[in-house]
Amino acid sequence: MPLAGNNNLDELYYLTRLLEERRGLLEREREALERLGGDEASLHIIDVEIRALSEESTRLGSSISDILERDLQR
């Protein structure tokens, strides 16, 4: 695999981990708010953020898969 491909994959894996960590934090925050009877607006905003992080993580996962598949075809 070319060195540039390695660097790109490393960056994509790193970003994916960051997104997953942030999503986990938000999920725990949402659970705490639900237990404390948080307001609906705050819960809704957290849910939107969690969905956005999940979608971006999925997009990055697809990019990783595409890169790996291309490298296998070489």
Image: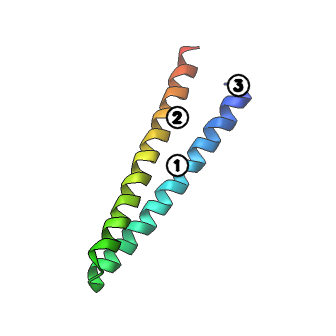
| Furthest residue toward bottom | 36
Spatial distance from mark 2 to mark 1, Cα to Cα? 10 Å
Tell me if 4 is positioned left or right of 56 in this view: right
- Which of the two discs, 1 and 3, sits closer to the camera? 1
Spatial distance from mark 1 to mark 3, Cα to Cα? 21 Å
| Residue 13, position as x, y percentages in the image | 57, 45
Spatial distance from mark 2 to mark 3, Cα to Cα? 15 Å
Amino acid type, callout 3:
Pro
The circle drawn on residue 2 is 3
The circle drawn on residue 64 is 2
Residue occupying image coordinates x 31% and y 72%: 41
Which one is earlier in the sequence, the residue at label 1 or at label 3?
3
Relative to 37, say whether 20 is above or below. above
**Residue that label 1 marks:** 16
Amino acid type, callout 2:
Ile
Residue occupying image coordinates x 45% and y 68%: 25
Task: Give the SS element for disc 2.
Answer: helix
Q: Callout 1 environment at 10 Å: few (<14), some (14 to 19), or many (20+)?
A: many
Relative to 41, say whether 48 is above or below. above
Relative to 8, say whether 27 is above or below. below
Q: Quadrant of the C terminus?
A: top right
Task: Give the SS element for disc 3.
Answer: loop
Q: Callout 2 environment at 10 Å: few (<14), some (14 to 19), or many (20+)?
A: some
| Residue 1, position as x, y percentages in the image | 66, 25
The circle drawn on residue 36 is none
- Assess whether mark 3 and mark 2 are in contact (beta carbons under 8 angstroms): no
The residue lying toward the viewer, choosing from 24 and 1, is 24
| Residue 30, position as x, y percentages in the image | 34, 72
Which one is earlier in the sequence, the residue at label 2 or at label 1?
1
Residue occupying image coordinates x 40% and y 46%: 55
Task: Give the SS element for disc 1.
Answer: helix
- Assess whether mark 1 and mark 2 are in contact (beta carbons under 8 angstroms): yes
